[in-house]
Image (cartoon, coloured by chain):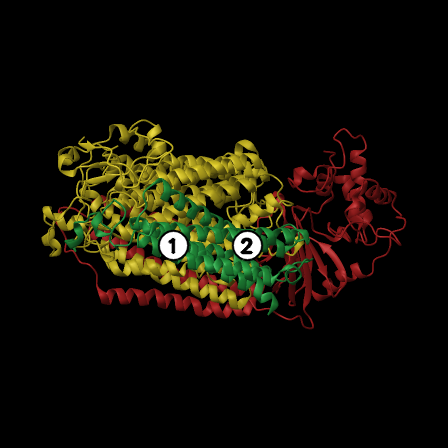
Amino acid sequence: MAIREPVEAPGADIGMLSRPRVRGGWLSWLTTVDHKRLGILYIVTSFIFMGFASIEAFLIRLQLARPEQQLLNPDVYNQMFTMHGVTMVFLAIMPLGIGFGNYFMPLMIGARDLAFPRLNAFGYWLYAFGALFIYTSFIFGDAPDVGWFAYSPLTSLSNNPGTGVDYYMIGLFISGIGTLVTGMNLIVTIFNMRAPGMTLMRMPVFVWMILITSFLIVFAFPPLTIALFQVIMDRTFGALFYVPAAGALPILWQHLFWIFGHPEVYIIILPAFGVISEVIPTFSRKPLFGYPVVILSGIFIGFMGFAVWGHHLFTTGMGAIANTAFALTSFVIGVPTGVKVFNWLGTLWGGRIWFTTSMLYAIAFLVTFTLGGITGIMLAMPPFDAQAQDSYFVVAHFHFVMGGGALLSFLAGLYYWFPKLTGKMLPEAVGKVAFAFTVIGFYLAFFPQHFSGLMGQPRRTQTYAEGLGLEIWNMLSTIGTFVMAVGFMLILASVIWAFRNGKKAGNDPWDGRTLEWATTSPPVYYNFPKQPVVNDRDAFWVQKYPESVHGERVPEEASKPYDEHGIHIPAASWYPFIGAVAIFLGSYAVLYKSWLLALVLLGVLIFAVFGWAFEGISGYHVDPDEEAESASTGTGY
Amino acid sequence: MSSHAQNTHSDGHLTPQGYRSTRLPDAKLMMWIFLASDCMFFGSLIGTYLIYKNRSLEGPFPADVLDIPVTTVSSFVLLMSSFLMVLALHSLRTDNIPRFRLWTFGVAFFGSIFLGFQVFEFSAFVSEGLTIQQNLFGTTFFTLTGTHGIHVTVGVLWLLAFLIRSFVHPTSSKDAVYLEVAGLYWHFVDIIWIVIFTVLYLIEFV
Amino acid sequence: MPIRKWLRRAVPLAGLGLLLTACDLSGPQSIFEPAGPVAQEQLDLFIFTYWLSWGVLVLVVGVLIYAMIRYRRGKRDDIPPQTHGNLPLEIAWTILPTLIVIAVAVPTVRTTFRTEQQVVPTEGDVVINVVGYQWWWRFEYPDLGFVTANEIHIPVGARVIFNMTSADVLHALWLPKLGGKRDAIPNQNNQMWLQADEPGLYFGQCAELCLGAHAYMRVRAVAETQEDFDAWVAGFQNLEPQALQADPLIERGRQLFAQKGCTNCHTIDNYADGFTVGDPDFPNLTNFGLRTSLAAGVLDNTPENLARWLRDPQEVKPTNYMPTLWETDDPNRDEEIEAIVAYLLSLGTEDAVQAEASFMGGTDGN
């Protein structure tokens, strides 16, 4: 390693803690500021929480397998579906998208890292500690039991004296702050750190979708954060935001929550669209059909996402006029979504479709998401929603969108990018068997719920009466869950196996189109020896096959070093981790009203912030010329 | 397009990381995005206040406690601090470090006066029986103005840190962009106060 | 070709799926058997979009399958033409979903205004004030001057207007066959209206999470002819105070109803002359003998079920607020329950003696 160190940035290091210099071992993961390592942390953490959520789902399905069972009493049952929903939405699928974005977005735009590497670490640790905080409710008392959208006044102290709601509110508050700062960080990175020549309309679609997602995060999370803050004020300091006896309006929570909540759906699904928009072109060996239209429709969906929250409130008595207005705005979203699906089909058309496991998931996504979209349009009709709202029809709908849409496409992404993440191939044969189990299990589990909903099964009910005709659908659903579980176990096993023994992947196993395939697998810690220069969409494809798109190869010498010293590698830092730990422990102090401890931890937080600000960026430089040889072998972390 | 591939510090980019697509400093872009997000924070709080306006079941009601002359004075002080902020930034840009220190201290000082007024106002309200637990007005009022007060406090601490740093570490016009970022934040907090002052205080007496 | 082989297997499978959808979708709470104009319009709207969506689905999946077969990477492993898009196509497939959406929007708007517009009660409407509680419903007929719980009677063909609110957390009243649902929200008055065209017993349940026994918060609507409805109303309006009951078992039940503390919560309007018992925030049991169900629709109202409910409320309806009144080793338990059951089932009924007789025959002492 030809590393000159340390090359101090000007005005740096009035630090109080020495910079961590360990580059290996588990400790280095606590202080890392590298977007790739943080991306892996995001992905691994979200899969761990997905595991917890799956266990909760099995318990729910066992309880509902037959009518009038009492495997779980209502209180436990309420905790199970609440934690399942909270985990899947906030702690598993959304961070999975952010994790993929964190890892691959900088590679795709030819950047060294995110704009604010330490802030990125801080964002991850807040998310991870927020998630951990919510899960410790199982140990220290009762888990939240109010559903993932925690409608007021279920959450008021008089209706819910346990600590479960506090864990929900405070945990989501801190993990939400983490998501917010990461969203801001991603925007700055995408705006500012694109490789020379990569104009906005040359960015890979995945990057575009991460950009739109980040804007949604920036504008949608504040209303949620304020709503959570209000309930924390109520429960901890005796404020009256959601106390009906004081004249409060419980409906306010629903508005604030869904002004966040509907954009949140797109925060989850847009990165998934991005993954699909990379996977389908690569395995069709064609550029994405209608690139500008796909991007414009993504932007349009993002905008409209803020105008449709009322369709979650059709039965709250908003009146016919408001219901109609929100129905129409919701219908409008169907148009850009349909356009996207057609463009993906257009990409397949005339291609050379390669049925890898990744591609199979992408195709399954297309069908499943179309079905979820159709039921979405149905639910946007207020008169039908008056029947379907809060029934299993809604459960089926959002599992088709979130599970069949987001999760299937992230599995496509996992199979697509695993070679880049680890340098190893996932076994394709096992992958296809797992795919069959997962998708068949998925349809078996969730398709029948359309029927059980319309036959009168409300969601969030611990059991159902015999004789309503719901028995067969629920039994099918439960069986499907276990079929799906087999698929997930196979995926997990093959990931673990491939990580150790997988076939070595080259730098570009799929004949990829975007810049991440230009570097080594796994990417060297500084990403690219020289900053790539871009002169077209699908930058890497143009380098390989310029004649196919009537493009021109960028000459080698056009790529310049990132800066005059070579590549700046920011130093690891303790402060993001310390700050996040202070907030994590401080959350317990607030929850259990231990004000002295809270004050001490506030002091630690302020220490971390000032230490962070004064230590500077620091780090060292790597010289790309001296690095050239070792770069081609790829040393990873 | 590859014309600005060669990038060094001399290009006017303050971070040592090199090429920037928009040529804007990362920190400035970040602050603008943060402020956009913060608008939504205050929007939600102000929205809550307006929805709960006139819904309190028992007093004290806004007209009973709000003292327009006092708050007008503190608002004026806060507005003037923004003016000093402009002077401080100008001084730093022209490498006039003593002036920069003076004006920066002035901003922090005026901000502290505003906070002092707020502490006074809060304790006066509490003594008149208005607490966060008293009625919806108290709940929404203290939460909204308290959140704003925390913003001002953060700004004061930020500027003081900037000031202290200038004694520990050589500070020059190269650092002006960071003061500019702090200034953006400060002006924003000011503007938000104008909105709050209008919506909470002035409207009551229209 | 493996794909073709796969298809040959998939087509019969898809046929099976169609068969499944064609199978029995009837049931006591199924929206597919509407019994009133509101539910009918809601269903019509769904059926319309259901058929429309088959078109979308067939189009998407058809193109997808065709492309998968036609353009699979086989022997031709070359680089295909790198087409970037096609403007006329883009315009076409922007217009297509727009047209579909308009086709859905027109009937949606019409039906929304027809079924969800605020209505003003007129002559012939039945108004019911609904208050949701954890985990039961209070129904007040303000124009007729009485209160009942968990079970409503409505005349066939009349518009029934619910004014809804909640006393604690959110609830939603859902009567699938009569006309959808509406939320009950504290500090807010919501309106829902519906109408039954056929006499019958209609089932429903609470559809908004209200913790605890949410799954057991059910409701029944008895739609009946105007004469039957008038008779039922008259039963509430002409209550005879029950000073002393002729039947000793019923009289003992009436005494026990007070002694065991039932009167602390439950109102029976004609329990005694001159003073009232109970608390309006608990289910009113006046004319309880006329109910078809107990414990908010969880069990049919039979002597056996009522005895089971009184013996161990938590076993019937977990987490509910009804106290267990007898220790398991209480020697008087069965005898006292028998008396209270006899008393409760006599309320509102002329043939109290018969109810008692059937209880004696049917009990098994568990």
Front position among marks 1 and 2: 1
Mark 2 chain: B
State whether residue B20 is above or below residue A34.
Answer: below
Mark 1 chain: B
Q: Nearer the viewer, residue C308 or A254?
A: A254
Disc 2: which residue: B145
Q: Quadrant of the C terminus of chain C?
A: top right
| Chain ID, green in image | B
Disc 1: which residue: B88
Do the residues marked 1 and 2 share a common chain? Answer: yes
Q: Considering the numbered disc 2 on the image, is that residue within a helix, a strand or a loop?
A: helix
The type of residue carrying mark 1 is Ala
Name the residue located 65 percent from the left edge and 68 percent from the top edge: C158
The hue of chain C in the figure is: red
Residue A243 location (% of width, % of height): 63, 51
The type of residue carrying mark 2 is Thr
The answer to whether residue A415 is left or right of residue A267 is: left
Q: Considering the numbered disc 1 on the image, is that residue within a helix, a strand or a loop?
A: helix
The answer to whether residue C253 is left or right of residue A502 is: right
